Structure formats: C-alpha cells, structure tokens
Amino acid sequence: MFIEKYGKYLLLLPGLIIIVFFLILPLILIVIVSFMQIFTFREPTLTLQNYIDFVASPQTPTILLNTFGMSIGTALLTLLAGYPAAYVLAFKIESIKIRNYIISLLLVPFFIDWNARTIAWIPILGESGAVNYMLQALNIVREPVQLLFSRWTLLIIWLQTNILFAIFPIYLALIRIDPDLINAARVLKAPPHRVFYNIIFKLSLPGVVVGFTFVFVNTLGDYITPALWAGGIQVLGLSISSFAANFVWPYAATQSTILILIALAVLFVLFKIVDIKKLVE
Amino acid sequence: MGVWNFVGKVYIAFIIALIYLPVAFMIILSFKSGASISFPIERFTLDWYIKPPTGEYAAYLSLFYDRQVFQALQNSVVVSSLVAMISMFLVTTLALTLRRRIAGRDQLFYLFLLGFLTPGVAVGLGLNFLFNLLNLEFSIWSAAFINVIYAVPFGLILMMARFNPDLLLYEQAGSSLRASPLRVFRRITLPLIIYEVISAAILGFLLSWGEVIRTQFALKGIGTLSTFIEVQLGVNPLTPKWYAAGTLLSVASFVGLAIFAYLLSKTTR
Amino acid sequence: MAGIVEIKRLVKRYKGNVLALKGIDLEIYRDEFFVLMGPSGCGKSTLLKTIAGILDYDDGELYINGKDMKNVPAYKRDISLMLENYALFPHMNVFDNVAFGLRMLDKDEEEIKKDVMETLALLELKGLEKRFPNEISGGQRQRVALARALVIRPSVLLLDEPLSHIDYRLQRRFASLLKDIHRQISGTAFILTTHDQHHGLSLADRMAIMNSGLIEQVGHPEEIYNEPHTLFSARFVGEVNTFMGEIQEVGADSVWVKTDIGYLKSRKPNAADNLVGRRVGYIIRPEKIKISKTGENAENSVKCIFEYLNYFGHYVEAIFRAPHNVRIKSTIPTYNLPNFKVEDEYWLSWSANDARTIIKPSVVEGVDIEDLIYGR
C-alpha cells in the first residue's frame, strides 16, 4: 500500500516544496542566468562570455582574495580566540549553571540588531570616538588616529559578532568527551600536551569544523559590514549586489555562481575530512 | 593549576567584555544630547526617544514621532511572526521524519542545511529571477519564506540535538497501547517536544528580525525595521537617534532571547 | 488447539539486506507463558517487536487470533508490549500512565478508574497514583510498566527483556510476580524475551532457543535441558561439559565416541544416516557426574586431578583437570561436600544414559563444532 510504504515521507512534503521553490529553483535560475548574454527568459542567448569576463577582469584576483581571504582569516582567528574560551568553559568551570549563564551572555550579541551592533563601533573607534578621546586625553597622540575603515576593523567587528559560533560548537564537542579517556591517557603517562593534542583536540574536531562553517558562511554572505567599515574593500557579495542593483543580472548571477561554488567546495572538503554529524548524534 | 584556572576565567571575562563593548556604547550614545556622536559626552537626555519634532531636533524626528519607523516596525512584526510560525511547523515535521533512519536521510538533512550555507545575496538574487520569470510580486510572504529557509536549519539542528533519545520508545509504547498515530502525536510526542517546538518558533522570529540582506532582496518598499534602518543609515547623518533605535531593537531581541533561554532550560520531566 | 499467535516462515530484513529473522516458524497458545531465549543479537527482540507491530516483516505470515497481521498497525492489534526500558511517559503520573491504554479504547472514566486501581492494587502500587515516573524507584517503575501493559487485558502480552535492568533481588521478585499474575488471569498469552537462562527456565511453560535469526529448538524447559537437539541449545540451557570427538562404534542403543579424554559411551543419537566417523559433541551435565577416590565400575570413568572449587551457596562447582588439560566441572550439593585436596587424583564417572552425543552444532548453517565449543 502506498500510504503504508511512503507515509513516513509525507511529512517532508511541505518542507520540500518550500525549499525547492525558495532555494533550489532560485539557485538553478542563477546558474541559467549566469550564461545569458542579456537577461530574458524568452529565447535567451546563452554564452560563456560572463565567465570569460570574470576571469579576465583585473579586479577578480583581488576580489576573490578579499572575499575568501577575509572570511577564512576571520574564521581561523575566531576559532583561535574561541577555542581557549570553550576549553575553559568545558573543563575549568564546574558549575553547569554558571556555564549556561556565560553561554547565554555570549548568545545575546548575535541577536542584537545587525545595524545597531555595527554603528556602535563608531563612537568607539571613530575619529572623535572613545579610543581617540582617551589617547588624546592621555597625551599619547595629538591628532585623532584613523582606526576605522581598515581590514583590521572588519576583522574585529566580525570576530565580535561571530565568536559565539566558534565557542559553542567546540564547547559542545568538548563536553561530549568521556573524561575517562583523558584519565586513561594520564594514567598511561601521557604528558599534558599530548593528552591535549591526541585526545581532546582530535575529539573536538567536529566542533571546530562546525564552528568554522558558521563563521565562514556568516562572513561570506555579509557584504554590508565590509562596505561600511573596511574602507571600500571589494568583496564578491558587494559586487553582486551592486551589479544586481544596476540590473546587470547575468553578470551578478555569474559572480553568485562562483561564490556559491567556491563556498560549497570549501565546506565539502571539510565535511569529507571531518564527520560533523558526530556532534548531534 | 590555580594560576591557569584564573587566567582562563579572566580570558572568558575579556571575551564577554569585547562582545558587550559596542552594546554598551550604543546604549550610552542613545541618551546623548545633541546631534553629534562624538566623545566626550557632556549631557544626557531622553530626547532621541520621545521629543516632539520641534526646535533643534526638527530636522531629525525622534523615534516616537517617525511614521516610517512604525510602518517598518509593523512589517518586522508581521514578517517575523510568519517566519516563526512557518518554521515552527516545518522544523517539527522535518525533525520528526529525519530522526528515523529512512532512506536518503543524510541527503535530505544536507539539502535543508543548504538554506543556511548558501550566501543570502545569491538566494535573494535567484528569487528575483524566479519571481521575474513567474511574474510574481514580492510581498510580506516572499520576505517571510526567504527567511524561513534560513531559519529552518538552525531549528532543525537544535531540535534534533535535543530530542529525547527515548522519544521513539515512548511512541512505540503508545501505539502498542492502542493509540492511533494521530493520538500518539497529540498525547505523547507533542507534549514531550513542546519546548523545542516553541524554541524553534522564537529562533525563527529572532533570526528574521535581525536579517538584512535576504529581506532586502525579497521585500520592496519601506522594508522591515532592520532593512529600513540600514537604508536610512546610508542617506541620513548618524545621530544618537539611530542608537536609540538600535537600543529599542536590542531590548526587543533581548526579551525574546530571554524567553528562548528560559524555554531551553526547561525539559519535560 | 489453534495457536493464539501463529508465525510461518517469518523473515525480517534490515537495511543492507542483513537478515534479522531468517524464517521463523512458531505457534504460541492461549494462556501459555512462552519464553524467547538467546544471546543478544539473536533476533528475539526483533521477533517480539514484529509480533507487536512496531516492526514490519518482509516475508512469511503472522496471525494473531487467527487474523492475518500484514499491514495491521500496532494499535489495531490485540497485544500489548512492555518495553525493555519501560518507556513510562515522563509527562504523565502513574495513574495516567496506566490509564493511557484504556483511554485510547475510549472507555468511560468511571470504568477506567476502577480498572486502574484494581491493577495497581494487584501489583502493590497503591498510593503511587499521583507520582511521576522520575519520583518512584526502579522496581516500582517496572511494575507500573507491567500494570500499564496488563490493564487493557490483551490476548498477547509481550515482555521485552523485563528482567535486565534491575538488580538481582528485584529480578527474582519480579519473576515470581510475573508467574503469579500469569496464573491469576486467563485468556492472555505471555511472551517474554530474556538472555538469562535462569529466568527463562524458571518462567517458561514452553520456550524457544534462538540463534542468529533462527530457532534452535522449541519445547518445555525440561525437554530442552534433557534432550537438546543442537550443541547450541545444550550449551545455552544450563551448565554442561562438552567434549569434541568422533563416533567410533555404534551399538543397538548406544555409541562410543573417541575424545581427548578417552573413549566415552552415550545414548545413541536420533539420526538415521551413517554415524561412524562423524565429528560430534559429547555432553554430560555437571550434576550427573559422580566423584570417587577409587574409581567405580561405571560406563564412563576418567581419572582427573582436582583444581579448585566455585562456591554458590547451596551447591559448589568442582573443577577437575582431565588428560590433555581438558577441564571438567561437576556440581555437588554443599551439605555433601567431601574434603577435596588440590592436585589430588579422583575418578569422575557417569552413566551412558545421562550423556548425549550431539551431531548438529546449530541449525545455523556453517557453524563449526570446534568453533562452538572453544568459542572461537
């Protein structure tokens, strides 16, 4: 009987319809449009010209380097900053209650309005902001220093908004480690650094990868922060949105296709190496 | 030993301070008198929240007198509520199906994960193509659904990670005691996952509340509060008014988040 | 007498074509206490859940009360199931847990209350109605789970490893409670799975020994203990000494088997074909062995060296070393215990009528006798 056999798939139907309509079809269209000479669905002329243009453009290497360099760089830096915090949280703070309070505290900024948390940096790092005020008051500098609008600003802002995503999955992976494994290694006379590397770090890898994924994806899709604070650094998302705003849709689609492909390729390789499902199962 | 524990705790305190630094400045600035946002702050005021449009602020309406802010707020509430309800429904149905070892489970899981993995700008652009192709108009609904596919993977992971490992056993026990599938769901499954279900709704609400890029692509006109402010920031001078707006938005998120955290801390007996 | 549960050539396939049940034939009668026994992974739980309707079967037939159960979901079957972890609904108190099945049958609340209170009284659970599952002890949880399954008075009560998650004393208590209740109510067949031979033997009216998705033997516990069809059954039910050997001579009603500890005589196995030269397992139960200092005029006698004792309270197990370092154990009632000396010589003897020669290692194909005996 059909219902008996496929009934369990029936509940998937609403979700499938929505994801096909609002994600899969748009993605297919992006690929199709990326080959169009002019945007039209009536007898379109398909061409490779957009891709040739993209590869030939002198800006391309810079854009790609900016986009993926900044995202991967931020992700690595965030993991580096987040790992010790997750470690302390998992192993050095005994009270579950306090741990949960700290996690909740870390959770808040992600949900604070996106605009609010970016404009908040101006009174801190701006020319007449708090840091410059302090530097001048302490007579360290005479003229205001330009602190905003650099790659470093972008890095700090992204670090601040994303660190939760590094800490949380690593923390989850760390607390799943059976303490007896660590004890066993110690009893077998493993020195602390080897206990850490061979047991704790290796077993926390799924968390690290999930953390990387979160930060990488979040920053890759965010072109507004770089536009506002990184002094006009060109990233792929920004380029896509400005071509799209000017209705140069096929070229925007080409750039989108490349953005998605590279992003998914990076994640695919990562997921191949580390089994992230270990974190939820 | 002791020293390292202490250093570790100081480090966590430092991370928390780093995270809250901008928040603190945003709140302080929202009470600053005068249109400039420079330091030091000489006087504090509530003007940016409630002052009628006269005198020195006439050029920049304070929040309570800005009609457009209210329109955007209304849009935000509608879109986020829709996202909350739709993603609650989807996350529940998907999580309940995908927890079983059915054929294609992993592929389906990654398919839904794609909603989070794909950059918003690409999804937004593609949706523009689709609506152009089908001659559809963007509306509150398109804005809601583009946020739904973003929020669902978060809720899905949350719910699947928190599923009671014995849930399937309880359901089996129920059906061996003459309960039809519908009754098993109503009397056993739903009461046991109700906190996760509500959490999924709140998560959807919060994620869409703060989302700018996706919403911007799928909702024309005045937009939601977040997209509205984003546009305003590009054309208006930065005054403490926007910090006041940010503060109000943050308070709203904070309340939502507090409810969310409270629900997550609860488990059914 | 028609069985209340009839199973014919039942096959259950798991993902990747692994066969969990490889063609089960079984008939279980009304009012019977039936035990499915076997090592973990033998398929007994799968069989139970297939009868319950929680698992589907791929081939064969299953009848309950004479009705074909293909595509009949669990909630429409005249069964109830007590799961291994009890699966008491954590969001309902004891009363609501027990009342659940009755409510699903849409009985009126008066009647439900009466039935629930009766069952709670039967299982010594009175006064716990308002408590939640996490507020009562493990033993109480177990009885609540039984009450919940029992109260709807099914034709078949399925009990999945009900004795495996509690300490030994509670196991004994619960086992005798089960037996009592089974005697008190009529019209319900109990089917219980266990990997523990003591519970299996003591509870069962009839039992089935399962191994790798097949049934090794079905019968009364005594029958299986005394006349095992396969070495697997013999070794799974009760303690046994097993010696590998080869049949050398066949008499009218006995055979001689050549083993490492000498030529041993046993009753002739029921096999029509040529017996001489077959590799077999020769078994003798430890309580059938007599120990003496001088050697008796018995059909089988082996000179051994005493090694040590295992003390079990009312009896002891004496371990001896026979030629070729073969170990033999013998059980002796404690009140009758001689003063054994380590490394002293003794004669172990038994009659051919108490020993069995078993040809089949297992009903599972490809199982080697040696592997089975030496546990390789």
Image (cartoon, coloured by chain):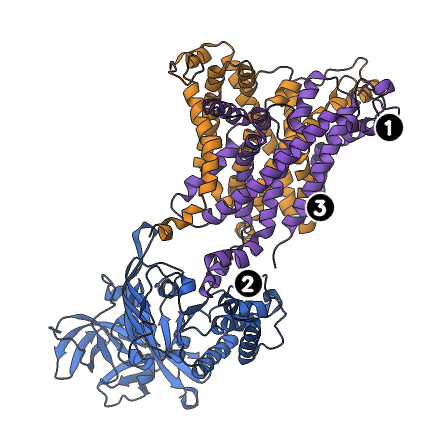
Chain colours: A orange, B purple, C blue
Q: Amino acid at mark 2?
A: Phe
N-terminal-most mark, 1 or 3: 3
- Determine the residue positioned at 58% across, 70% down: C95
Q: Position of residue C230 (x, y in %)?
A: 25, 72
Instruction: From the image, tell me which residue sits under label 1.
Output: B45
Q: Nearer the viewer, residue B264 or A184?
A: B264
Q: Position of residue B196 (x, y in %)?
A: 58, 48
Q: Quadrant of residue A212?
A: top right
Q: Amino acid at mark 3?
A: Gly
**Marks 1 & 2, CB-CB < 8 Å contact:** no
Q: Residues within 10 Å of mark 3 (few under 14, many from 20)?
A: few
Q: Quadrant of residue C350?
A: bottom left
Instruction: From the image, tell me which residue sits under label 3.
Output: B2
Q: Which of the chains bears the disc numbered 2?
A: C
Instruction: From the image, tell me which residue sits under label 2.
Output: C89
- Determine the residue positioned at 42% across, 26% down: A28
